[in-house]
Amino acid sequence: MVIAFVSLRIGTLLEILPAAPHGLARASDPVLDAALMGVALVESVALCTVAVRRRRYPAGWWAWADVGLAMAVLLCEPWYLSPDDWVGTWTAWGGALSVNAVFGAAIGFPARWQTAVATCGVSTAYALPSVVLSHAHASTAASNLVSYAVFAVAARSSATFIRRLGRDADRARESAAIAAGQAERDRHRLLLHDHATILRLLSEPGLEPALVEALRGQAAAGAARVRSFLAEPDGATAGSPGTLAAVVRYAGEGFSDLPIDYAVDLATDVVIVPAVADALREALATVLHNVRTHAAAGHVVVHADAPPGLGCWEVSVRDDGRGFDQSRRPLGFGLRVQVGRALAEVGVEAEIRSAVGEGTVVLLRGRLEGQ
């Protein structure tokens, strides 16, 4: 809006100045004409400078001063111009300046009534000498009055649209920043959630040697991942094997203390992309951490295959542990975010079924490549 106003004002001045010598020669009072022209030039330069420095149109007394100067120039025309020059010539340069003043008022004033008052004031100042006193040019002058309303409505509408667009962009940037911050916090929590479980278990006394050994191995692997994350947080994901069976076995390597049976032979040739493999590995590790911590299971079955004709692969983790009431116990961060949300982001569905005393089943399903 500043660019539009300054460009229009500079264009107006560049049109006025070449006509100034001829206008001064025809003026009935060239001294008054030159004085008003000088004041208008100085005021325009100052107004444009302030607008550029502030990066917005100055809508306070600067705007009213611009409108007042335009009205003064128009009202003074009978004293420094002959009636034949009041309408339709660049000798009457006040008309062009006043249209530019109305444009500035339309984009600058915050309230509609301020724009309306400024437009009516300038229109009245133009009409008094041009319509009321100059009967010969009354019809032309009356037509010119329409331009004030047109400029005011068009400029005001455009400015309102641009401001609304700017507010929407600001809100979008703010929402994006909040979402980015939340995503970053979730990324940290995803990294630390399972490691916190490992550390808590290691701190408990009286653990079985097999469990201690498994936890130490997982703690060492977790420490390596944290170091990698700190060194290069945007690419700290460990590489995962490319087949479904390999991903499942890789995820369960640190859980030798659990009574797990793997049924993954039918997934040996099922290839999944690295992003899905990484998310699946993390999700399976979280599920097994939950089994270790909460289920008290005597038997765990991890099954993976790609049923013919469905165009998808499936992985299920079933335990015969204590289970939980899904209607009364909300999912924790691990199952809700690290399994559900993280897998959804790579197009993998997660379904959890559980009942008290009947164990828990976690079913993961993703699309086969090329399907």
Image (cartoon, helix red, strand yellow):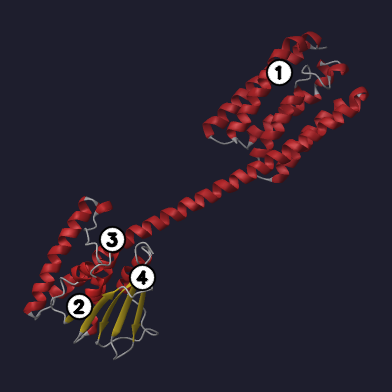
Q: Is residue 158 above or below residue 352?
A: above
The local secondary structure at tag 2 comes to strand
Q: What whole-number distance in Å separates the C-alpha atoms at marks 3 and 4?
A: 30 Å
Outermost residue toward the left? 209
Comparing marks 3 and 4, which lies closer to the viewer?
4
Q: Quadrant of the N terminus?
A: top right
Front of the two marks 3 and 2: 2
**Numbered badge on residue 188:** 3
Left or right: where does residue 115 sit relative to residue 249?
right
Tell me if 102 is positioned left or right of 239 in this view. Answer: right
Q: Nearer the viewer, mark 2 or mark 1?
A: 2
- The answer to whether residue 12 is above or below residue 241 is above
Name the N-terminal-most of marks 2 and 1: 1
Mark 4 or mark 2: name the one nearer the start of the chain: 2
Please, what is the three-letter code of the amino acid marked with disc 2? Tyr
Whether tag 3 and tag 2 are in contact, CB under 8 A, the answer is no
Taking 104 as reference, is 269 above or below it? below
Determine which residue is flagged by label 2.
262
> What SS does tag 4 mark?
strand
Badge 3 marks a residue whose secondary structure is helix
- The label shown at residue 16 is 1
Distance from the alpha carbon under mark 3 to that under mark 2: 30 Å
- Distance between mark 4 and mark 2 Cα atoms: 19 Å
Question: Disc 3 vs disc 4: Cβ atoms closer than 8 Å?
Answer: no
User: Which callout, 4 or 2, points to the residue nearer the camera?
Assistant: 4
Q: Residue furthest bottom?
A: 357
Q: Earlier in the sequence, mark 1 or mark 4?
A: 1
Q: Residue lying furthest front in this view?
A: 309
Residue found at the very far right of the displayed protein: 135
**Residue shown at 24%/57% (left/top)?**
237
Going from N to C along the chain, the mark reached first, 3 or 2, is 3
Label 2 near label 4: C-beta < 8 Å? no
